[in-house]
Image: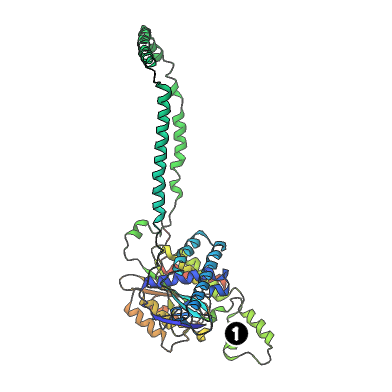
Amino acid sequence: MQRITRISIDHNDLTKLALLEQYSLMLSLLKPHLTERTFSIFAIPKLMSNNDYLGWYTHLEGQPILIDHVADESHKQKIKDTLTTRINDIETAIKSIPLNDEQQKFVALWLPRIKNLANQIFVINDEPVIIFDLAKPVLSQPVIPPVTVSKSFWRWWYWLILALLLLGLLSLLWYFFYPSSPENKVQSVPELIIIPPVLVNKPEPVSKPAPVVEPPKAPQVVATPEPDPVPAIEPEPIINTQEVPKVKPKPKVKNPPNCITQDEIKNNPNPSKMVIVFDNSLSMTATLAESPAEVEQFFQYLSYGYPRNMSEQEKVDYQKKMTRLPSRLSTSKSVALSSIDKIQPNIGISLVTLNRCPAANFTQFYDYAGRSILKNNITRLNPSGAGGGGTPLYSGLEKASSMLDGVNRNDYILIISDGEDSCSRNNICTLANYISTQKPKLKINIVDIAGEHKIDCVADMTGGKVYIAQSPKDMIKQMNNAVSDLKINRPVCQ
């Protein structure tokens, strides 16, 4: 993989970092469903030099040049046509990708950003590559006004034709009901005058029903005592007996004594925050199905070489055995995802990952609504030996502590790792002591997967605890204990 370009980036600009996270998430959703050639139009972003720079990488080989620097216009147009074809292929593929509603909306929202005219287009061996622009907004397409003009034009003709039809109908009525002969006109008038007197004379006999005086008999019927038993029907007690069980379900809701109320959440303007420091180094690929001694022997072979009498096939079989599931990484990811769901909704969570030397990577803080993005980040973790690998634990702890307050509020760090720092010679215990004096309300718990107790001082100096987890069952139990001890997993009161 080669780097196309590098730009400076402010790691405190959370908006750009959030866009970068979303862009990476979109790529992870699309990649399994696109061909390599189609997917190659996307440059891969990677933070560099302690997150002060952003590098854009590609698997394509060759000299990258900006499309604007292509001198031959016909050649340039051919490349643009190729880019258009690839984007059309992506739009067609999206329709067949099995995404849920949330993912469909997310991808559809990002399609205009892919086609954004502000993006830089590089060319590598006639293959276009898009460099996503984090600074400039998406350029929208212009609205075509003739559509509205044509609609108003046809509305005008519609009303004109309707008016003409009405005039024609009135003319026909006039012709048939008002003939031109004057004799007929005179005859028609008396006919109209004769009709009303008939209507006036008829109501007089109708007024004779003076028998209306008989209403006194009606009160006798109404006054009869027979209707009194009607209210004796007892629907009301039946309704009341039915309503009683509807009111009684209230006692069924039994909130735990330590639940957090909605008022507590609303009235706390400065809630605690948490950073998860996650070891994503190559050592995390080791299986949990073997003893710590066997795993240590495996690491010795990886560091110093396999025995001479071991054949190539035996090496392959041995490596498969020592990296089979459940591995340290797969179990840690699974348990971390379930633990995040238990953390109360007013706690912001960030992720610091230990991928390779020299420095750790980090994300923004995610609120409750953004935890799905945080979980996707954890799901996508995959160790790589690129750049030599390594575990920058010192850098990760330093970065995590700098993101938290720990003075005016209680903040927390949860470290999930199987070893010690392999990138820095700095003493991590000295760093932990400095953190404890500068941020006395910052507590650090550790889930030690290897059980070697190499970084216990970090927890001891900050008032935290170390939890040893060397099997899948231990992992679940100890992770729950580590989160519970931080006292940020209070359920919301119902």
Compared to 140, does 289 lie above or below? below
Q: Answer few, some or many: residues within 10 Å of disc 1's Cα (few below 14, many 20 plus, some between 14 and 19).
A: some
Q: Tell me which residue sits at (61%, 83%) in the image.
A: 294
Q: Mark 1 belongs to which amino acid? A: Phe
At which x and y percent is residue 249?
Answer: 45, 45
Helix, strand or loop at label 1? It is helix
Total tally of numbered discs in the picture: 1
Q: How is the image coloured?
A: rainbow
| Quadrant in the picture for residue 54 | bottom left
Compared to 277, does 198 lie above or below? above
Q: Nearer the viewer, residue 197 or 332?
A: 197
Q: Nearer the viewer, residue 130 or 492?
A: 130
85 relative position to 483: left or right: right
| Residue 344 is at least partly visible in this image | no
Q: Tell me which residue sits at (41%, 49%) in the image.
A: 151
Question: Which residue in the structure is indicated by mark 1?
Answer: 298
The residue most toward the left is 408
Q: Tell me which residue sits at (57%, 62%) in the image.
A: 96
| Quadrant in the picture for residue 300 | bottom right
| Residue 90 is at least partly visible in this image | yes
Q: Tell me which residue sits at (31%, 63%) in the image.
A: 269
At which x and y percent is residue 408?
Answer: 30, 71
At which x and y percent is residue 69?
Answer: 44, 81
At which x and y percent is residue 385?
Answer: 53, 83
The residue most toward the bottom is 308
Compared to 85, does 280 lie above or below? below
